Image (cartoon, grey):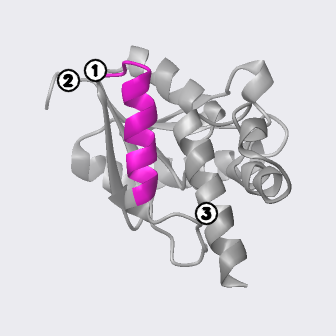
């Protein structure tokens, strides 16, 4: 078994928010390596491709000087992906009022599937704890880029606004 402390932070990250980045920054201090894993879910209809999401995460992490972050995509069960990487911890960011019941259910299922893999719940700092990718899309559909930068990094705000322009050109 490796002595490197490795954790996986999975999510859709469509797009990544400052809340996600807060979790990434804090988790990166707890582990030698943090793999931010973009889940590919055929049921969801994301705005950005998995590769675009990985690039936005890489760019935001680089701008913050986070050197122990890797990004990748995956399909299937998160716990199986974590085991394949040799990770012993899955990081889950939770919004206190909305995510806890579903996350606890998932954690208990993961413990049954892979008892040696722990789930660590982190809540984004106060002013970011309510932010979700869905909220970003809603704000973006009604606002200008500058308003988004309250909730997402600059590179993500620019990408979201480009996506809004593409979508409005489609109609």
Q: Residue at x 49, y 29 (%)?
A: 24
Q: Position of residue 43 (x, y in %)?
A: 58, 78
- Whether residue 114 is visible, yes or no, is no
Name the residue tied to disc 2.
4
Q: Residue at x 67, y 45 (%)?
A: 104
* Mark 3: secondary structure: helix
Q: Quadrant of the N terminus?
A: top left
Q: Quadrant of residue 5?
A: top left
User: 82 above or below 77?
Assistant: above
Q: Is residue 144 left or right of residue 40?
A: right
Q: Is residue 104 left or right of residue 131?
A: left
Counting residues from the start of the chain, the first of labels 3 and 1 encountered is: 1
* Contact (Cβ within 8 Å) of mark 2 with mark 1: yes
Q: Which residues are magenta?
A: 52-67
Name the residue tied to disc 3.
163
Counting residues from the start of the chain, the first of labels 3 and 2 encountered is: 2
* Mark 1: secondary structure: loop
């Amino acid at each position: 078994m490796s002595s490197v402390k490795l954790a996986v932070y999975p999510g859709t990250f469509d797009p990544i928010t400052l809340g996600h980045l807060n979790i990434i920054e804090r988790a990166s201090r707890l582990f030698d390596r943090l793999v931010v894993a973009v889940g590919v879910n055929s049921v969801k209809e994301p705005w950005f491709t998995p590769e675009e999401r990985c690039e936005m995460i890489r760019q935001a992490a680089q701008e913050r000087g986070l050197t122990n972050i890797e990004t990748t995509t995956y399909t299937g069960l998160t716990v199986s992906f974590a085991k394949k990487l040799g990770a012993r911890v899955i990081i889950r960011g939770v919004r206190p009022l909305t995510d806890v019941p579903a996350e606890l259910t998932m954690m208990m299922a993961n413990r049954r599937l892979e008892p040696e893999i722990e789930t660590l719940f982190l809540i984004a700092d106060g002013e970011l704890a309510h932010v979700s990718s869905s909220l970003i899309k809603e704000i973006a559909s009604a606002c200008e880029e500058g308003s988004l930068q309250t909730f997402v990094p600059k590179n993500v705000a620019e990408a979201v606004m480009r996506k809004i322009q593409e979508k409005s050109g489609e109609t």
